[in-house]
Image (cartoon, rainbow, N blue to C red):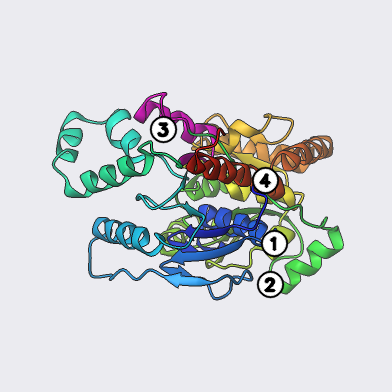
Amino acid sequence: MAESPLSIAFVVDRFGNRYGGAEAYGVALMRELAAAGHRVTVFAREYDPACDLKLPFRPIAVGRRWPSWIRVWLFARRAARATRPGFDIVHSHMNGWCGDVEVVHVTPVRYRWRVQPMPGLRRWLSRLSPRVRTYLGLEARRVAPRPGHRVVAVSQLIAHQLAQAYGPALDAPVIAPGVAQAEPVSAERRRRTRAGLGLPAEGTLCLLVARNPMRKGLPTVLRALAELPDDVLLLVVGANAASRECVARAPESVRRRTHLVAETSQVEPYYQAADLYVHPTLNDSFGMAPLEAMSFGLPVILSPAPWCGFAQYVRPGAEALVLSHPERADELAQAIGRLRADADLRERLLAGAQDVLARHAWPEVARRYLDLYADILRERAGAPS
């Protein structure tokens, strides 16, 4: 572990909890490192003004007039220049080449375009696409071996995909997200919280928190809701235009039981108001929201791997209920019904969740990164790691 305070540059697209799980990972990790006395400077396009963690911030401006793939390339180039001098460690969550530590949160580009099965014509066209070629080139530079450099995967799923994309020679340790244990929520506090949020006082409230609810399984949840009694309700936090349209197309009996909340950086009250968490995601390299739900004492229902990387970190039936497929609305409805009817099952899952939380404490995550930083600094100095 690093013994003296380090100067750390943290590179991310947007800094703040409201932007999604990968961004929340960065906020929580930098909070731990700053609390330990390390000097953290954030490099990003945007810093959420509502974020309670205030760190030195250097904006990286990229004009919106460019296509997305050019913006990513411009950001990578400017981040590399901005972080070159004056830092012991550059810790990056972005595709590019600036980081000493490169944390991969999503399916690798090369895995998606060169390993996953796809129609032959689409693969051939991808070889001509400047967008795909740019992303592939950035990622190749990002993972290229060099002294004093490490690639980190946030889940076993991502580590497996990296190995398939770049071969077993790419050593990517897994450092999964952490979580902070929340205070227990009593029944009375749950009632007061619901009242304060304008939610019904009675009924089983299922929660889904997502920056893009459609990708996290909202259509499946709505179909499951149609099979459940009228006192089963749904709360969606992070609702965007697509999710509002999806709800508007649902049967009236589902619409009137569904409550939509826009993207917010203050999600804690919604966890406190809920009775259980549903996460039939279609694409999550890890899945921080169900882990956070566990910290608030909510039983969790989630997709299996490979759709949800977090499923690899729980014991099905003992720590969470795991579906056979993210689009099995009938299974989701049955799982919700079981949690409503079986108090012993709820208690078993909540007890098991404590083991999950113990394995994913943020101080332990920070310690592992500090050990990684120390290895990098020793390597630069020519000492054995």
Lower sequence index among marks 2 and 3 = 3
Q: Residue at left 47%, top 63%?
A: 86
Q: Residue 246 in the image: x percent, y percent?
A: 44, 56
Q: Which mark is residue 77?
A: none
Question: Which three-letter amino acid code belongs to the residue tagged 4?
Answer: Arg
Quarter of the image that includes the N terminus: top right
Q: Which residue is mark 2?
A: 198
Lower sequence index among marks 4 and 1 = 1
Question: How far, Cα to Cα, is label 3 from label 1?
Answer: 32 Å
| Label 3: which secondary element | helix
Question: Which three-letter amino acid code belongs to the residue tagged 3?
Answer: Leu
Q: Is residue 246 above or below residue 119?
A: below
Q: Residue at left 67%, top 45%?
A: 367
Q: Nearer the viewer, residue 99 or 262?
A: 99
Question: How far, Cα to Cα, is label 2 from label 1?
Answer: 36 Å
| Label 1: which secondary element | helix
Q: Which residue is mark 3?
A: 162
Question: How far, Cα to Cα, is label 4 from label 3?
Answer: 24 Å
Question: Which three-letter amino acid code belongs to the residue tagged 2?
Answer: Gly
Task: Report if residue 229 is visible in the image.
Answer: no
Magenta range is 150-171
